[in-house]
Amino acid sequence: MNKPIVIKIGGATFGKHDPILEDVVSLQKKGQSLVIIHGGGNMITEWLKKQGVETRFVRGERVTDKPSLEVVAAVLGGLANKQIVATINNLGGRAVGISGVDGAMVQSRIANEELGYVGITVKVDTTVIEALLKAGFIPVISPISYYAVDRPPNAPLMLNINGDPLAGEIAAAINAEKLIFLTDVTGVLDKDGKLLSIVTTDQVKNLIDSAIVSGGMIPKLNACLKAANNNTVTCIVDGRQPHALINAIEKDIAGTVIRSR
């Protein structure tokens, strides 16, 4: 089995990602091992509204209280995950949908008490991922984690978790060949708004420290740093472009490539 490629599909692409999944199926049929991690923030907000649950943010990050956690788990582990899996299978691929809870795969603790039931990864157990890859399936992973560390009595057994850093943790744990973020932006931009086609890990730190990059790009770049330290090639790609995934994998055409040196 060749080294797997980890793909993070951003929540902003939901409803628009069938062409991405066509690329996924095409690559699988060529023998490429793939692992998908997905988001679903927009869908969560929509369903919270339907359930009459208030959406609150602290410094741009979603607060997950107990009522929100129930919706997050249902949407990410259910509807969002199964839409992707069903589409891949309908296109002729072979995929299985799981969450970080399955097999205690993603073990976590509370990240920041201000954010409620939001976790950071403590450990990734790759057993389930490796079994699915060996059996010829694409694991499609939703970012719900097992609350395994420092859990108080009567606290939920699950935590919401940011899919971007999770992708970096999983890529490092399975020794992935590449980590590709499919987003709704062209890539990493410099202070003048121009695309940076290649960025070293040292430059990533400078971009973050100098606030040239901000918001949702920061967890993506930190995930790239985590994976790059394990010699995984990482890319941030505009998933809106035709065949963006195939171009990033087969032609090395990507928005921004992050390299260790």
Image (cartoon, rainbow, N blue to C red):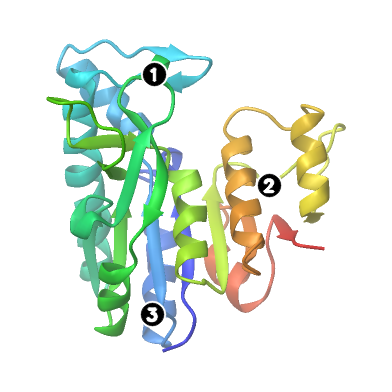
Q: Which circle's residue, 2 or 1, is located before the other in the chain? A: 1
Q: Amino acid at mark 1?
A: Glu
**Rendered position, 187 above or below 45:** below
What x and y, as percent, mark residue 18? 36, 57
- Residues under labels 2 and 1: Cα distance? 31 Å
Q: Which mark is residue 252?
A: none
Q: Mark 1 and mark 2 in contact (Cβ < 8 Å)? A: no
In the rendering, which numbered label is found on residue 113?
1
Q: Residue furthest right?
A: 192
User: Residue 28 shows which numbered tag?
Assistant: 3
- Residue highlighted by disc 2: 187
44 sits to left or right of 261:
left
Query: Between residues 144 and 92, which one lies in front from this camera angle?
Result: 144
Crowdedness near tag 1: few (<14), some (14–19) or many (≥20) residues, C-alpha within 10 Å: few
Residue positioned 16% across, 28% down in the render: 70
Instruction: Estimate the spatial distance between the alpha carbons at disc 3 and disc 2, rounded to whole Å.
Output: 25 Å
Q: Residue at x 78, y 31 (%)?
A: 209
Mark found first going from the N terminus, 1 or 3: 3
